[in-house]
Image: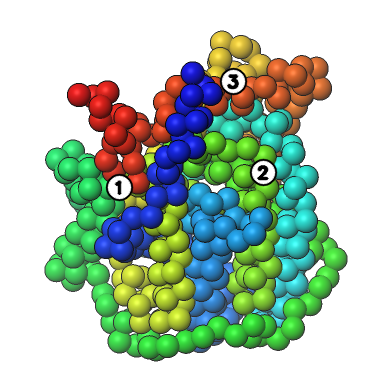
Amino acid sequence: MARVSRQRSATRTHPVDELLPLPKLTLYGFQHILAFYAAAVIVPVLLGNALGLSREELVHLINADLLTCGVATVIQALGVWKIGAKLPLVQGVTFTAVSPMVAIGIGAGGGTAGLLVVYGAVITAGIATFLFAPFFGKLVKYFPPVVIGTILTIIGLTLIPVGLQDAAGGAHLRGEPEYGSAKNLAYALGTLLLVLAVVRVGKPFLSSLAVLFGLTGGTAVAWFLGDAHFGGVGEADWFGVTTPFHYGMPKFELLPIIAMVVVMLITMVETTGDVYAIGEITGKEVDGDTVTRALRADGAATVLGGVLNSFPYVAFAENIGLVRMSRVVSRFVVVAAGVFMIVLGLLPKAGALVAAVPHPVLGGAAIAMFGMVATVGIQILGKVDLREERNALVLAVSLGAAMLPSAVGPFFERMPDDVRAVLDSGITLGGLTAITLNLFFTAFGRRRATEIDWEEYQDQEEKQEYGGYGGYGGDGTPPPAAGAAAR
């Protein structure tokens, strides 16, 4: 049966590779932009403010980030040579790198002088990621479903508080009376309810645009009540181009480079989880070669980021959640989103328009999208035998480790900056714990069982020709075989 399934799949375009009509590409791609934008620009904003950059320098950082995000996303989704997973993965700046980059920049004197040292470390770490990708891809056999499912669950559970923080008004309002106000919570809840209502009553096409309806509807209500402001659109320039090494030639210093290489090793684990997550959602087979191509794209994008005044890159989990919610799995939708990002990076006015989405509105939609990431992890864990004590301990201890940075923050504040850069992240700490425990329990003593784990898992998936997202095609409609079965 598996052989027949493979032969039938070979003669039919997989929904991931389906090229949708231009109007649908535009709508679905723009939905990804709305879901992506706030998280995309927060890293340059945090770093720029921490290093004391001027407003003009900060605007340049944001434009450079958006432009590089677009190029990186196109490479990852479209594929160039042996670079890019050819899956619907949106690339964005990794949050794991924020604390190390701030520490590196301040240690180098802050301002643009600090940025030059940061960029030297980013470029070197990107090259290291690109070169190490094939070796890391061979280690995938040591990442069985219990590890991947645990990491994805941790990513979702760790990001949900970020969405809740936006729902309360955004981190910039923490400590202010407006933070957590009834008005902000009403905007977030209204947006979430609108998303749920569209999914509940809409046909497949409308349901696939539920997040877009929620964000635009919530923003329209906020504008009507005077809480969404578009004044920044008039102040922004029409056109702006980021030039390579805008702040000067990067500086390469050993300790910053080591810290950034460690950060990229952590993001490689995260990217591996993201690739398996999108494979689970889309029903596309994922193997070590797929992971290698995805990691090469991360490395190439990170090098490009250092050259174009941006930062390290990784697949964005919120957009993976959007793919799961919308059931639109065509990678060309993500390519369209990448093109939109490039346009936003070249047209500051367009970027300012998207930036007008209020934080509470974005937070309402983010709660559902981040929750979907955790759901994919739980879906994978559902096929793991958790009655096996070793599997249960991998999950239990890793979840506990992931909660440590947020639950006992002062503990990490007393640690050296280099150590804190690695451990002061729930995703990092939980992911490393899952990998280490799995190796401890299984890899050294029962290597054969660990290696065939994913093969057994994928054999189960072959029973559903289009995988775990319910057999829907790229436009939200069931494939012919599924429709015939339903009739």
Check residue 475 in the rendering and tell me which mark sits there, or answer none.
Answer: 1
Residue kind at label 3, given as amino acid type: Glu
Q: CA distance from mark 1 to mark 2?
A: 27 Å
Check residue 289 in the rendering and tell me which mark sits there, or answer none.
Answer: 2
Question: For the point 52% across and 82% down, which residue is it?
Answer: 60
Question: For the point 42% across and 26% down, which residue is it?
Answer: 464
Check residue 169 in the rendering and tell me which mark sits there, or answer none.
Answer: none
Task: Kindly identify which residue carries mark 3.
Answer: 456
Q: Nearer the viewer, residue 309 or 190?
A: 309
Q: Residue furthest top?
A: 387
| 198 left or right, relative to 7 | left
Q: Residue furthest right?
A: 254
Seen in the picture, residue 11 relative to 47 is either above or below; the reply is above
Please rate how many residues cluster around mark 3, counting C-alpha atoms within 10 Å: few if below 14, some from 14 to 19, many from 20. Answer: few
Q: How many marks?
A: 3
Inspect this view and state whether residue 23 appears. yes
